[in-house]
Amino acid sequence: MLGLDIGQPTGWSLVTFPYFLFKIVSQKYFVLYVQCIVFLVLLVLSFTSTKCPPSGGFLIPYFIMLILEGIPLFYMELAIGQKMSLGSIGAWTAISPYLGGVGKDVEPEFAYNSTKTSALVFGIPTLPDELQCVVTSLYLCLYYNVINAWSFWYLFHSFQSVLPWSVCPMNSNRTEPIEECEIATPTQYFFYRETLNISPSIEEHGGVSTGQAMCLVLAWILTYLFIVRGVKSTGKVVYFTSIFPYVVLFIYLIRGITLHGAINGVKYMFTPNLEQLLNPTTWINAATQIFFSLGLGFGTLIAFASYNHYNNNFERQAIIVSLINCGTSIFASIVTFAIYGFKATVNYENCLERTRLLLLNTFDLAEDSMSLDQVFDWIEKLNATYPLQFAEIANQLEPCNLESELDTAVEGTGLAFIVYSEAIKNMPLPQLWSVLYFFMLLLLGMGSMLGNVTAIITPLRDFKFLSHLSDELLNGLVCVFCMLLGLGFTTTSGNYWFTMFNDYGANFSLLFIVLIEVIAVSYVYGIKRFEKDIEDMIGHRPNWYWKIMWAGVSPVVLITLFVVYIVNYIRGGTPTYQAWNKELGKSVATDYPVFGQVFIGLLMVSSVSCVPLTALYVFCRKRKRGNHPKRRAVSTVST
């Protein structure tokens, strides 16, 4: 993924999220296009799930997927939400009962409702197509606030004279540094041991980490306070959470490009990698990155667009916001890779320096006889001149390679908390940069959580038995439910479950959800009918580009990616995860145990099973009540 991608992180970009909240609060035309930022939290963590680093080999698929999938589907979801003026559950129920499930044999027809009342005219919705969007958003909410808990943890530890991840702590005898820290690095030790207190494997369980649990509770309390009054209070919060990170990011840009070796990271980012282009996984990752950064398939876009005025020009918004989203992805990526370039260059030069000292001491050379730039020349020269003596130290020579350092810099769990903290500790005034960075990370994470929680709460309002609950109570119940389940991620093996949700809880389901959405609109609801709805709202019909994408290109591309994903998963053998080995001081690939594999299967199936279950349920109800007269509702949906 691009930029700082944190995981799969959430599925709601700070380009799109603040925009619709500002629209809801002010109901004015968008005047803050330039306050968008690619969801840096998502952008940092998605490295943990993308096998391909976001270098030049990723940029090309990213832009192609933006044109073929991102912009057309972004436009489509805005149109659906604005037309139906319903949450995702009600909106997809309105398109087809087989996508939603309705009451007693009712054809679900809805009128435009500017007051945003209950989703269903008749009946109670069952497990709808877009309930699986709610399921996906729920999975994200369960584990994503853990990232905010980590941000709190690092932020609190940034107010120290010496950053705790910059040096190894002493052992209990106070005689030498802790062995695990010396074998690894101080930044890795602080993340895996001090922060996570991680177990050796997913099979070894331990108690809840008190510090992490308290930070998680704090994160959920803030989330609740931000959304307690509903979407309008959320919009006010986003004014700050989206603008302040821009200030910090700009500061980091200036600082980043002035760091030694920053240009190496930027070059790495823009250098094409043909091997990655030939890897199908790269294209799947590019597509899912687009879905995450634009918020496609989560139901959040539909939820917020449903608050728009009926004649709001969503077409213009879809194009501008999507392009700015992409542009800020590149902007964030430059900042990120400048930092990575600095870190990789420092590590590379340290490796060269160790090799230089080894050669100087072994062959008794003068201190100034060899510079870092001459290390490789001297290795060849000494190997040719003193082959026997050189052979004695050959196993002590480290393979110093800048490209390898750059590859390493963009892989691994907890990237934002390991790689960035390692870069920060080498900067002047590290406490200042640490506070700025983790506060920014926290704001971005909280902003993303607002979108995730709203994606759950808004559709839940479409259920009649929940519609009588106040905003404060319903929001509180959702937050408490997610918080209690999320405490499982603060156990010693919690990070492995976090990784499981991150790797398998969204990619597969998002591909399926978005595929069903575009097929439902194009072939169930009908392109011509959809065109008329758009014309009714904005005064003209969509041009040929949109229709070709919706009816042909987007479904074909999504079907291809979906099939490739399944084939790769089957051919990949037993799924693995990165288990922390304290003896080696690094993570090692480990096969998931049987219960882990079963849970992965359940995780994937549960997020895509709503559509077939709903279709079967509605079909059975129609057959059972086929002789009952249908009730009709007044509708403004085009026919």
Image (cartoon, grey):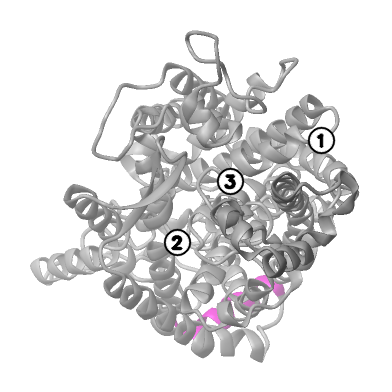
**Looking at the image, which is closer to me, 426 or 12?**
426
Question: Where, quadrant-wise, is the N terminus in this rendering?
Answer: bottom right
Inspect the image, locate mark 3, and give the three-letter code of the amino acid beneath it: Leu
Q: Which residue is mark 2?
A: 91
Q: CA distance from mark 3 to mark 2?
A: 38 Å
Which residue lies most toward the left here? 624
Q: Which segment is the magenta one?
A: 526-538
| Number of disc labels | 3
Q: Of label 1 and label 3, which has the lower sequence position?
A: 3
Labelled disc at residue 427: 1
Please determine whether, in this image, residue 11 is positioned above or below residue 316: above
Labelled disc at residue 415: 3
Q: Of label 3 and label 2, which has the lower sequence position?
A: 2
Q: Is residue 355 visible?
A: yes
Please determine whether, in this image, residue 529 is positioned above or below residue 191: below
Task: Name the residue at 47% across, 29% down.
Answer: 180
The label nearer to you, 2 versus 1, is 1
Q: CA distance from mark 1 to mark 3?
A: 18 Å
Query: x, y (%) of residue 138?
Result: 40, 45
Q: Is residue 490 left or right of residue 243?
A: left
Callout 2 crowding tier (Cα within 10 Å): few <14, some 14–19, many ≥20: many
